[in-house]
Image: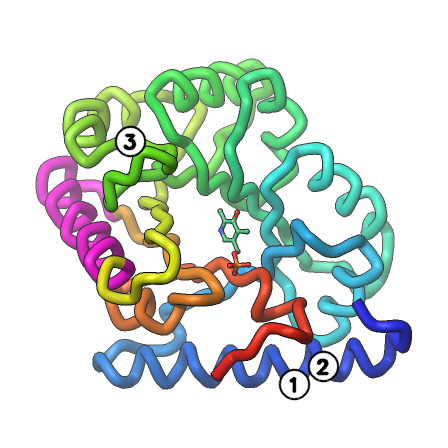
Amino acid sequence: MSDDPRSYETFLRDRRASILERVADAARRVGRDPGEVEVIAVSKTVDADAALLAIRAGWRLFGENRPQELGRKLEALEGRDEAAGVRFDMIGNLQKNKINQVIGRVRLIHSISSAHLAEAVSTRCEARGIVADVLLETNVSGERSKSGFSPDELRSAIEGVLDLPGIRVDGLMTMAPAGDADAARRTFSGLRELAGELRGRTGLALRTLSCGMSDDFEIAVEEGSTLVRLGRCVFDRGYNLD
Ligand SMILES: *Cc1c(COP(=O)(O)O)cnc(C)c1O
């Protein structure tokens, strides 16, 4: 972040406009309505002051990957006029012992990566009398380092997960291999096809496809993403968008 908060805010505002333009262009290239695609500003690497500047610059939807940092940001923004209508999504690995720090505080949990975790979140939501909107994180690329359901695990687990009373499954989430545009495209199209197959089998809408990060969001939009999660290209002045 810069020393001069005003000029950082200007950077954030200009950058936001370029990002939204690129998202809209990518959507139009494939005949999609740009209004179908939401953008989350992933604030995990910046402090609450920078998040506040991002709010002033126009961002309303944020993503965090650690429950503790989520709590810190929510507390810092609480009661501030600018933060009215601002929501956070949980996008990172969720440990069972941290579930209670997240449910009821976020708009959407992107990272339900196993049937066990789905059950644990559902149980804790039921105990609180709430229903959490969630995405099922799917390891489409098959990389060992990535968490999530394999496509086959998801095919066999989906019916059971849909029966859980404390969660509502809005769609799927994935992460593409880094630094390989072709592999990213295959991953995103694979997610779209898997969602189509599961819609046919379950009758569920699975409306949300969360995929695309700073390096690959335009490809993701071309392949059907409805929710891109952008960190570095939103907040990092050193990130070259071209
Ligand atoms: C950090 C993170 C992002 C944002 O990545 P950038 O490359 O900084 O855009 C998106 N999704 C998840 C799950 C992340 O952890």
Establish if 101 lies above or below 40. above
In terms of secondary structure, where does tag 2 sit?
helix
Do labels 2 and 1 touch, CB within 8 Å? Answer: yes
Q: Which residues are magenta?
A: 184-205
Ligand 1 within 8 Å of the CB at mark 2? no
Under mark 3, the amino acid is: Phe
Which residue in the protein does label 1 denote?
Answer: 14
Specify whether residue 4 is painted magenta. no
Q: Say which residue label 3 marks.
A: 149
Which quadrant is home to the N terminus?
A: bottom right
Label 3 element class: loop
Q: Nearer the viewer, residue 230 or 176?
A: 176
Frontmost residue, 62 versus 168 = 62
Magenta span main SS: helix
Q: Pick the residue in front: 172 or 163.
A: 172
Badge 2 density bin: few <14, some 14–19, many ≥20, Cα 10 Å? some
Q: Is residue 185 above or below residue 196?
A: below
The residue where tag 2 is placed is 11
